[in-house]
Amino acid sequence: MDGVTTTTAELAELAGLVARGGVAVLSGAGLSTESGIPDYRGPTGRSRRAEPMTYQKFVGSAEARRRYWARSHVGWRQIGDARPNAGHRAVAELERRGLLAGIVTQNVDGLHQAAGALRVIELHGGLDRVACLSCRERTSRAELERRLREANTGWAASGSINPDGDAVLTDAQVAGFRVVDCAGCGGLLKPDVVFFGENVPRPRVDECFAMVAGARALLVLGSSLKVRSGLRFVTRAAELGIPIAIVNQGPTGGDADAILTVDAPLGLTLSGLTAQLGEITRAG
């Protein structure tokens, strides 16, 4: 396997696994790189140029919040403008054909839903929503962006974008940026995502485990599985004897538990998968 294209044998084996239906999908950042969103560890990724924001820093420091929202305001342009790629569309097509038990995504970009997928569990939340830490009201990111633009007329900055949707900015660029609070109660606003130092809500984790446990197979797409957040679902599937297939560019932390690993671009491979499944259906 050359890591560039999917072989006929690999595609046939992958199609045979998915054709039985009941497949749980676990997706990671590698699925969204073809939409222009950088990955952490894949071949199109980059090392972080800034330390990630922790929940403790965010709630404990007004300056940390200013820095976060300035960086996120710039980065949102790329995340908000991103569109589903062939991989997202293929996953939505698999769901439409009734082959999926559901989708667990580690991504916060909303691209599965934008492609038409319906049963999606956002493990780490979504950047398209904002939550008030006081009254708990959730509002759209688009509305927050409108308010931030109004509060920062004349402010402009640019920087490289991290996978989690923030930009790398200097202290000088951040200076003068104005943060806005909840329009309803004046409380602190936070993106509706799980920060470092925060736990994924237990009911959400349990829902993901239940989806995996009830599946006939687990298909991992674009995740290096280097951290426990995603790897735990692969570990559970392996414990239950559920077959695991992984499509990712580069090795992953779950390769030893997989019956099939495909090192190839996600969009091309998944488009080929849907075409192969169509042939299987016609032959049947």
Image: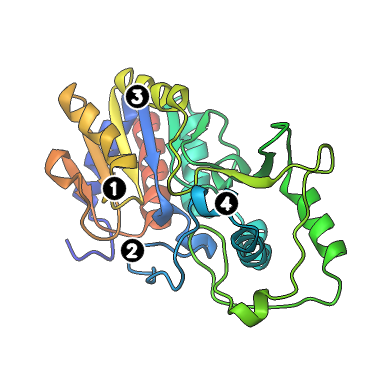
Q: Contact (CB < 8 A) between labels 1 and 3?
A: no
Q: Contact (CB < 8 A) between labels 2 and 3?
A: no
Q: Mark 4 highlights which residue?
A: 60
Q: Nearer the viewer, mark 2 or mark 4?
A: 4
Q: Residues within 10 Å of mark 2 (few under 14, many from 20)?
A: some
Q: CA distance from mark 2 to mark 3?
A: 26 Å
Q: Nearer the viewer, mark 2 or mark 3?
A: 3
Q: Quadrant of the C terminus?
A: top left
Please report whichever mark, 4 or 3, sits nearer to the chain's N-terminal start.
Answer: 4
User: Hey, which quadrant is residue 42 in on the image?
Assistant: bottom left
Q: Mark 1 highlights which residue?
A: 227
Q: Quadrant of the N terminus?
A: bottom left
Residue 243 in view, yes or no:
no
Q: CA distance from mark 4 to mark 3?
A: 33 Å
Q: CA distance from mark 2 to mark 4?
A: 33 Å
Three-letter code, disc 3? Phe
Please report whichever mark, 1 or 2, sits nearer to the chain's N-terminal start.
Answer: 2
Residue 76 as seen in the image, left or right of residue 187: left
Q: Which residue appears farthest toward the left when viewing the image?
A: 256
Residue located 28% across and 22% down the image: 216
Residue 42, label in figure = 2
Q: Secondary structure at mark 4?
A: helix
Q: Position of residue 277 (x, y in %)?
A: 37, 37
Three-letter code, disc 2? Gly
Residue located 17% across and 29% down the image: 238
| Looking at the image, residue 93 lies above or below residue 10 | above
**Closer to us: 204 or 223:** 204
Please report whichever mark, 1 or 3, sits nearer to the chain's N-terminal start.
Answer: 3
Q: Position of residue 46 (x, y in %)?
A: 39, 71
